[in-house]
Amino acid sequence: MMSYLEGRSARLIAIALLGLSLLACGKEDVEQVAREPVAFHQEDECHVCGMVISEFEGPKGQGVGNDGVRKFCSTAEMFGWWLQPENRISDVSLFVHDMGQSTWSSPDDAHLIDATQAFYVIGIPLKSAMGASLASFADEAAAQTLADEHGGQMLRFEEIDQQVLQQSASSQHGHDMH
């Protein structure tokens, strides 16, 4: 009985090792790209709407992955793209401008931060592209200050969904937006 179990165990181990080696043979080596933010250029177009990004005020967003960089004319456009189920499974790093280190009219690409760690202020009357303004900040106190000044609300990355984007865009209806 013991030799039967030992033989069976040895066969199972051999089969498992063979299966693992076959899986390894079939896998392509995927070259990892640097997951760092990149500068926006005058001719860059928004991945979602196709508008020229530099024509709009306010913070921008980008997704950097193995298959390239996607740039967005606003943080709202980045979220609109990211919240689509097929994009949520993408292996990308998301970046936004830190508006605590930038001016609204001309965000500074030297201050792009991890979008998943940022604080966002919604419900503010500042101009931005394509609907809702979501001001992004690395510093919670700076975000809260803007929210208090303009009667906005501060949220974290994981709190933003399609409903938040729609409510924010509709609350700005009637404000002077692009």
Image (cartoon, rainbow, N blue to C red):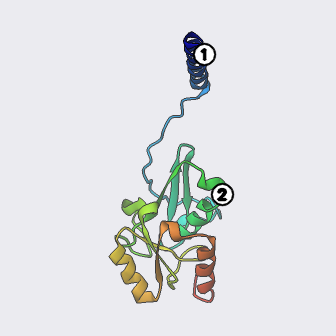
**Which of the pair 161/17 is nearer the observer?**
17
Q: Residue at x 53, y 47 (%)?
A: 65
Which mark is on residue 178?
none
Residue 171 visible? The answer is: yes
Q: CA distance from mark 2 to mark 1?
A: 44 Å
- Please tell me whether residue 29 is drawn above or below residue 65 in the rendered image: above
Tag 2: amino acid: Pro
Query: Residue 119 location, x and y as percent?
Result: 42, 71
Q: Nearer the viewer, mark 2 or mark 1?
A: 1
How many marks the image carries: the answer is 2
Asked if one can make out residue 46 in the rendered structure from this viewpoint, the answer is: no
In-front residue for pair 11/28: 11
Residue 112 at what x, y percent from top left?
Answer: 41, 61
Residue located beneath label 1 in the image: 8
For the residues labelled 2 and 1, say whether their Cβ atoms are less than 8 Å apart: no
83 sits to left or right of 137: right
The percent coordinates of residue 120 (x first, y second) are 46, 73
SS class, disc 2: helix
Q: Residues within 10 Å of mark 2 (few under 14, many from 20)?
A: few
Instruction: Measuring from the top left, give residue 58's x and y in whole percent.
Output: 48, 73
Question: Viewed as shown, does residue 102 lie left or right of 74?
Answer: left
| Residue type, numbered disc 1 | Arg
- Return the mark for residue 85: 2
Q: Which residue sits furthest top?
A: 3
Residue shown at the point (59%, 19%) measured from the top left: 12
Q: Compared with residue 172, is residue 48 higher up or lower down, i.e. above or below?
A: above
Indicate the quadrant where residue 169 lies.
Answer: bottom right
The quarter of the rendered structure image containing the N terminus is top right
Observer-nearest residue: 52 or 25? 25
Quadrant in the picture for residue 3: top right
In the displayed orientation, state which residue is furthest to the front.
1
Label located before the other in sequence (2 or 1): 1
